[in-house]
Amino acid sequence: MLQICGKDILVEGKVVRIARLNAEGYDTLDEPEAAQQQIRNCGTRMDLFTFVEKLADPSQKHAYQVECDNLAGLPVSTFDHWMTKQIDFKARNKARKAGKAGVVLKEVPYDDEYVKGISAIYNESPIRQGKKFWHYGKPLEEVWRMNGTYLDRSIFLGAYLDGVLIGFVKLVMNEDRTQAGLMQIVSMIQHRDKAPTNALVAQAVKSCSERGIPYLWYANFSYGKKQDDGLAEFKRHNGFQKIEIPRYYVPLTTLGRLALRVGLHRGAGEWIPEPMAATYRKARKIWYERLHGLENA
């Protein structure tokens, strides 16, 4: 992993190589000019460098080529305001349902017991959201290492049923504590009738409110041409909004400039019609479920 201006940089792509912050949204870039210069001098070929603005101030501040990106963002004031004004009745009922079912929510330390609980959640099923779950079967040491990043800026939440971890959140704040992101939020499928994921979102809002963090975010609200799905509906019900933010692209080579001109930086997904992509996702879900004997799960 390369480091530029003290930040880890991820380089993606085989033909057009695009560099970005490895923990985009959790890390932010305050000096893009210095980063650009360091990238040019690092000895590794990168054709484009991309970065985004913060949720707290998403106005365009730089003269680089810019395109519109988005995050699922939630302005946070008080927990009561979120519960009574920002979510719909369905999410409100589900947030309360967990408590009635005996689910206990709390902030927890990052220790051996917690990591073992995370591992048990990961290993419940090899398939999630219709595709292969890439955390399934990971060794305990890898689970510890992967979730143990940014410990000085992380808040770990647990949903417990009879003392057993059935859902967790890793909440990571950016450097100036103006936004916190749900880096991980996973619950046991067998306990989804108790709505632990809704309860974990509620606890995340509460944790942000108590610390004066003004924005909570949960990945993107929409992805390219992809139609709304269950996850997008979940975010909407829980008060997350589509917040548009500028994404800057800085060409570093002739190939990078050409890629920007013809749109190669957007990836193959932009060229595939959404109906065709939706059919593929449905077929992939059926295939994985049959492969693992989960058709009726």
Image (cartoon, rainbow, N blue to C red):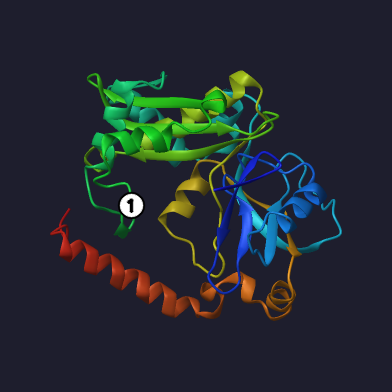
Mark count: 1
**Residue 84 drawn at (x, y percent):** 56, 30
Question: Can residue 2 be seen in this snapshot?
Answer: yes
Q: Amino acid at mark 1?
A: Trp
Q: Is residue 209 above or below residue 43?
A: above
In the image, farthest residue toward the front: 43
Of residues 39 and 21, which is closer to you in this image? 39
Indicate the position of residue 105 as horizontal and vertical percent values.
Answer: 38, 22
Q: Residue furthest left?
A: 293
- Residue at 33 percent across and 38 percent down: it is 142
Residue on which disc 1 sits = 134
Instruction: Give left or right: position of 161 versus 226.
Output: left
Q: Position of residue 169 (x, y in %)?
A: 43, 33
Left or right, 161 with respect to 104, comes to: left
Q: Residues within 10 Å of mark 1 (few under 14, many from 20)?
A: few
Residue 103: tell me if it is visible: no
Task: Check the image and report above or below for 95 versus 14.
Answer: above
Q: Residue at x 58, y 31 (%)?
A: 82
- Residue 122, position as x, y percentages in the image: 28, 41
Residue drawn at 48 percent across, 54 percent down: 232
Instruction: Label 1, secondary structure: give it.
Output: loop
Identify which residue, 103 or 129, lies in the foreground. 129
